[in-house]
Amino acid sequence: MINTKLPRFYYGGDYNPEQWTEEVWEEDLRLFKLAKINIVTINVFTWSLIQSDETTYNFEWLDKVIDHLYQNGISICLATGTANHPAWMAKKYPDVLSVDFEGRKRKFGFRHNSCPNSPSYQQFAKELVSRLVDRYGNHPAVSIWHVNNEMGCQCYCENCEAAFRIWLEKKYGTLKAVNKAWNTRFWGHTFYDWDEIVLPNLLSEHLDKNNPDRTAFQGITLDYYRFNSDSVLDRYLDDYHIIRKKDPQTPITTNYHGHATYKPLDYFKWSQYMDIVAWDNYPAYNTPISTTAFRLDMMRGFKNGDPFLIMEQTPSQQNWQPYNSLKRPNVMRLWSYQALAHGANSVMFFQLRRSIGACEKFHGAVIEHAGHEQTRVFQEVSELGRELKELDLTLLESRVESKVALLFDWENWWAVSFSSGPTDLLDYVKEVQNYYDAFFNQNIQVDIINSETDLSKYDLVMAPVLYMVKPGLSTRLEAFVQKGGLFVTTFFSGIVNENDLVTLGGYPGELRKLLGIWVEEMDALFPDQKNQMIVKGQFGALKRDYECGILCDLLHSEGAEVIAEFGDDFYKGMPCLTKNQFGKGEAWYVATSPESAFLEDFVLSLCKHKGIKPIDEVPRGIEVTKRTCDGQSFLFYLNHTEITQKIKLKGESYKDIISGKAVNSELEIPSKDLVILTEM
Ligand code: GLA
Ligand code: ZN
């Protein structure tokens, strides 16, 4: 059993001593101590330094680094170094080089571009990791293994093509089954030999280089995405198994991409193989707070609510955005606590010392080019380090609990985005985010789940745009509602099975009985075109009418109660919001994409109906979350606004665990500040 319980809040980040002389290492240590840094990630992009040819390895510099850190009491998050193959390897073993979507073979350069199905890459990477674990597997300073780095190459080379055919054979057994699953009689695609199957890229099923989603054969592209995600996962697992064999204890992870909703990899599937989920949190200059919150909840959702790591964030600015604005004073601290508020147990930065050359020299760092501690950023980092060191350790063990689940499924996402029609305006991530925002804005805690998650602990399950209904899901949803659960889904749901083949007999296919409706047609609206939702009768906080757009379903009730109707066009008067009593519960259908005012009123009404309460009612811009441990609650109030906010608390007697001060029923939080309250 791997112990993923952290001994303290990890605080630190990516450290590249290989770019510096040993005198600088001494200075680094002094500064790390000042900033209360307790963990550093090393060895991320060092393969070429460790291995200069097939047989020559040089670990001495790494021995020194590791011992130096250990002697100074700093824990190590040790990367495998497999994130970037060396130049000599690319020259001598060109199969390590990937082929891109346009069919071009890459040359050496950049990073994260090794072909996952390259035999040479696999052999050399395994050898490197074996040697690394032999050497450091039992080193007391190594506290986390960090496989590779932000994995995720999509490759279209011949090795991948061959591996794809094997993957298909394993999945489908026969070509007949493949032909059926992909509906290959369409456009004369029937395959008679496995070798006739080629990878779907710009040279085959795709035509638009600016829109890689546009495919002629959804089934093929969908299976390629599954296959590629699995191929990259297999490389993670190669490293995982080598480490685990020799080091039975230390948690192993890899860092997930900053987008979180990183399309090439099915992170829900991946997370089964993470001992602890780790994320690189890089909000852009214009990223809404709720977008970060959604991603944070997703990280927690990947492993059913387990705490996760923030493996990277910038202390000040990025280099790769169009406008790399600085994090304003106190914002780095506020956003670090936002991560904790959603279940993270670490705050780690990219990077600890700013490099002097190449593309990340303008990326923020704890130690700036000035090289000393007299900087705003360093001061803020060390202030936060001091606070985290003192933080109540019960918080480490606490979890975020929720009665509401929002379903986000990678394969569904792929399928929706590959769909040709009914509209280019439909963006799955955005649709789910819209629903998330409605909860977020009212401080109702949400878990992010996928199609496989057990639903039994939830009262309300929302699955916007559940286009693909995977095997068994409709039965599980029916059982959930039957027992009293509240289920909500929307337009463009229940359309296809896991192979992107339409479920015949009327939309929403497998969900039709549960929802008590039949969708006959779908109307796609132009970007500036709107319709109205006219509410009939009364439901909770719903008002008389709302705007909607993107898609409008023309549907008939088959037993569901009509709560709202379209207000315009030739389908004026047809249902756009329905509720179906099913067993002890209800199944709702939202037949269009509504404005946010509707979503807020709607989710609030549903929650009231189910007795699910907001954690607190506070002015907009204050984020409130709750972590609990054995009956003890930690309430986070984060003031994202530009002004001081006054809040009237429900209880009488709290303690702010950061300042240690007692708080009565009134709270004043300055702009970009926060408190974490626990009841006394
Ligand atoms: C990613 C990588 C890091 C670094 C940062 C910069 O998250 O993992 O190596 O490049 O981006 O923001
Ligand atoms: Zn390849």
Image (cartoon, rainbow, N blue to C red):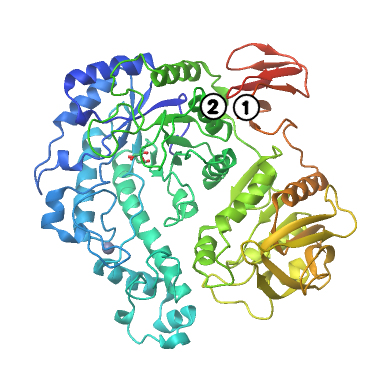
Q: Is residue 213 visible?
A: yes
Query: What amino acid is labelled 1 in the image?
Result: Asn
Q: Is mark 2 within 8 Å of ligand 1?
A: no
Q: Residue 448 vs residue 109: left or right?
A: right
In the picture, residue 572 is in which quadrant?
bottom right
Q: Is residue 186 above or below residue 383?
A: below
In the picture, residue 30 is in which quadrant?
top left
- State the image coordinates of residue 157 (x, y, percent, origin top left): 26, 66
Report the residue that reaches farthest toward the right. Answer: 537
- Dot 2 falls on a residue whose secondary structure is helix
- State the image coordinates of residue 39 (x, y, percent, origin top left): 36, 26
In the picture, residue 676 is in which quadrant?
top right
Q: Are marks 2 and 1 in contact (CB under 8 Å)?
A: yes
Report the residue that reaches farthest toward the front. Answer: 528
So how many labels did they put on this image? 2
Q: Residue 247 vs residue 322: left or right?
A: left
Callout 2 environment at 10 Å: few (<14), some (14 to 19), or many (20+)?
many
Q: Residue 520 vs residue 220: left or right?
A: right
Residue on which disc 1 sits: 639
Q: Nearer the viewer, residue 550 or 636?
A: 550
Query: What amino acid is labelled 2 in the image?
Result: Leu
- State the image coordinates of residue 665 (x, y, percent, origin top left): 76, 17
Residue on which disc 2 sits: 334
Callout 1 environment at 10 Å: few (<14), some (14 to 19), or many (20+)?
many
Say which residue appears at 40% left-offset and 67% top-offset.
224
